[in-house]
Amino acid sequence: VMAKIESEKAFSNDSAEIKDTFTFFRELANYPMLIGAAGRKGSDFPVYPFVIFDVSAGKARLHDALKKFHSLDKDGEIIEVEIANRKMYSVKDENEVKPYWGWVYNFLVIAINDPQGLTIKALSAKPKDTGKYIQNPASPNDFLTSYVDVTKILDTVRSAFPPQEAEKM
């Protein structure tokens, strides 16, 4: 899908920006992640979805890539916000349901509809065990979590094929 979007002629004026954006998200997909959702009371939208990427091995590179992604915002739509006593980023929007993203230790956190920063608080509760958290989350509001390591999945799939075929994947 991403290859199709990248090749669309409609984006020709912004092709470098689009390519940079897709490169950033494609690289993120190579890191282990926790995908989840938790209940949120007192909101018209009673759930907050989140993704936590463990980017320990590539934080410096991804930090630079995220800065480059932010630099694509020529209209000032990306703003700094404070969520759970941490500097995060969001978008200028009057809606109650907003995303935020930013760094918590060696993790890139992306959440929607979580203005209290419950995702950050759960991740920050035990700093020494943070790496274990994404593999075994324990938050009372979580109703869906899935740990995904795309690299391990691809390595496992590749191991089922002859080496010449696996190299092509």
Image (tube, helix red, strand yellow):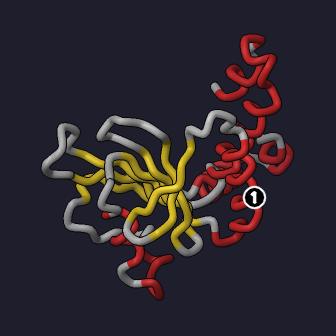
User: Is label 1 in a helix, a strand or a loop?
Assistant: helix
Q: Pointer 1: residues within 10 angstroms few (<14), some, or many (20+)?
A: few
Determine which residue is flagged by label 1: 64
Residue located 25% across and 46% down the image:
47
Q: Is residue 96 above or below residue 67?
A: above
Across and down, in percent, residue 121 comes to: 35, 71
- Which residue type carries mark 1? Asp
Q: How many marks?
A: 1
Residue located 67% across and 29% down the image:
2
Across and down, in percent, residue 32 comes to: 56, 61
Could you say which is closer to the camera, residue 76 or residue 6?
76
Across and down, in percent, residue 142 comes to: 25, 59
- Residue 86 visible? The answer is yes
Residue located 74% across and 67% down the image:
60
- Residue at the far right in the pictured view: 164
95 lies left or right of 133: left
- Residue at the far left in the pictured view: 42
Q: Quadrant of the N terminus?
A: top right
Across and down, in percent, residue 129 comes to: 44, 84
Could you say which is closer to the camera, residue 68 or residue 105?
68
Q: Is residue 162 above or below residue 127?
A: above
- Residue 160 visible? The answer is no
